[in-house]
Amino acid sequence: MRNELKILFSEITLYSSYLSLFFLYFKNFYKKIKLKPVYLFILLPIIWSLIANFLYIGGWERDSLWDINVVYCADVAYSTGADPYRDWFNSPECQESTPLQFTYLKLVLDALPFASFEYDFFEKIWVSFLVIITIFYGFFTAKLFKLETNIIFNIIFIVVMFQGANVVALQAGNISAVIYFLVLIAILLLQSYKYRSLFFLIIAIASFVKFHLALLLLIPFVLDKKFDFKGYIIFFLVLLSLFFLNYIVHGNFINQWVENLAYVDWGLGPRFSDISFLQPLWLGKIRDVEFNAIVKVLLIPLFLINIFYFKTLIKNKFTEEESNDFLLVLTSLIFILVLPRLKVYDFLFLSCIALKIYTDCIKDMFSSDRLIKAICLGILLLFYSLLIYWRPQWDGSNNSYYFCFGLYILYQFLIYFRCRRSA
C-alpha cells in the first residue's frame, strides 16, 4: 500500500507542477514572488524529489555502499596476498557484502589505501568523502559555466536529477563519483591554454579505471578548431603506459580480470537486443550485452555528423566561449547516449551539464520569440518529469536515456533558433 501511495503522490505532484507552471508563467504570478524564476519554476518538483529520496533512503532495509565495499574487500584480499578477483569476500567483514565482482585492473589496488582502515571506519570515511565531493560538484559546475545560481541549489539539483539515479549512485558509493569529479576538473582545465594538456592526462587515468571514459575525447574533438595531436599523444602514451605497467607487475592476473569482466550486468536500457527483428544478428553469435554495446557505438558517427553540421550553423553567431559551452553540453549528452553500458552513476556528470541546460531554458523563457518560448517550456516539462518520481531509478528500467535524447534535440533547437534570432 505504501508504494501505491507514493505513486499517487508523485502523480499529484506532477500535475500540480504543470498547474503551477500555468499560473506562474501564463498568469505572470512569478512577478509577485520575490524568489528568482530559476528557483521558483522548479521549486515544486525539487521539493517532491527530495521527499521521494528521503522516503526511499528511510525505507531502505538492505546495506548501502555495495559497490565500494567490493573494492574495499578486494584491497583487503590483495593486502593479505589473496586473489582480489576470486577471494575478495574471504575476510570476515566482507562475508555479507553484495556478491558482485571486482572488475578493475589490479594496479588500481596499488593506488588505494582502503585496506589500511577498519571496515566500519572506512565506510564513515567514504561517506564523508562523497559528501565533500558532492559539494564540489555544485561548485565546479558553477565555475565551468559561470552560473549565478546558489551553490546549495546546484548541489540539490545535481543530486536529485534523472529520476534519482544519482541518489542510487551515491548510495552505492561507486568510485565513479570520484572519477567523474576528476572529469569535471579536466574539462575546466581544457578551457585553459596553459593547462589544457592536463585534460588528456586526467582522462587517460580515468579511462584506465573506467574504460568507457575514453569516449570523453569527443569533447576536444568537437570543440577544437584543429586536431590536438599533442593532447591525443599524451592520452595514448599515459594509458598504454598504465596498461604496460599493470602487465609487468600483475601480468599473471590478467586472465582472472578478463574472466570477471564477463560477469558485468546489462546496465540500464535501452536494450536493442530485445528488439525481435534485430535478434537474428546476435543470437547464438555474441552475448546480448555485447550486442547492445555495439549498437550504441554504431550511433556515434550519426551524432558526430549532426554535431559538426550544427557547429557550422552557429559559427560566428555567438562568442567563442558561448559556442564552446553549447557544444560541450551537446557533446556530453552524446557521450551518455552512445555509452556501450550505461549505469546510474554516469548521470552524475550529466546532471552538471543539465544544470546549464536548465538555466539557459529559464533565461529564454521570457524571450519575445514564441518558438523559443515554446521550446523552453518543452525543456522545462522534461525537467519536471526528470524530477518527479516515487522512487529513485534502479538498474533495469531507464527512462532517463530518452529524457537525455529529448534534451539533446530540444537544446539543439533552442540554440539554433537563438542563432537565427540574432542573425
Image: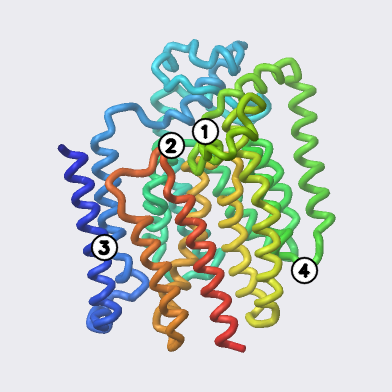
Query: How far across and down, in percent of the image, does residue 113 sit?
Result: 56, 28
Q: Is residue 132 left or right of residue 54?
A: right
Q: According to the image, label 2 marks what residue?
A: 396
Q: CA distance from mark 3 to mark 4?
A: 42 Å
Q: Nearer the viewer, residue 71 or 211?
A: 211
Where 323 falls versus 45 (above or below)?
below
Q: Nearer the viewer, mark 1 or mark 3?
A: 1
Which circle's residue, 1 or 2, is located before the other in the chain?
1
Do tag 1 and tag 4 residues touch (Cβ < 8 Å)?
Answer: no
Which circle's residue, 2 or 3, is located before the other in the chain?
3
Q: Quadrant of residue 204?
A: top right
Query: How far across and down, in percent of the image, does residue 104 sit?
Result: 62, 28
The local crowd at label 4, few if under 14, some if 14 to 19, many if 20 or more residues have their Cα within 10 Å, is few
Do tag 1 and tag 2 residues touch (Cβ < 8 Å)?
Answer: yes
Q: According to the image, label 3 marks what residue?
A: 44
Q: Which mark is residue 87?
A: none
Q: What residue is drawn where x is 79% and y is 51%?
A: 232
Q: Nearer the viewer, residue 389 or 155?
A: 389
Q: Nearer the viewer, mark 2 or mark 3?
A: 2
Q: CA distance from mark 1 to mark 2?
A: 8 Å
Instruction: Name the secondary structure under disc 3.
Output: helix
Where 274 falls versus 222 (above or below)?
above
Q: What residue is drawn where x is 64% and y is 19%?
A: 259
Q: Which mark is residue 266?
A: 1
The local crowd at label 3, few if under 14, some if 14 to 19, many if 20 or more residues have their Cα within 10 Å, is many
Q: Nearer the viewer, residue 373 or 171?
A: 373
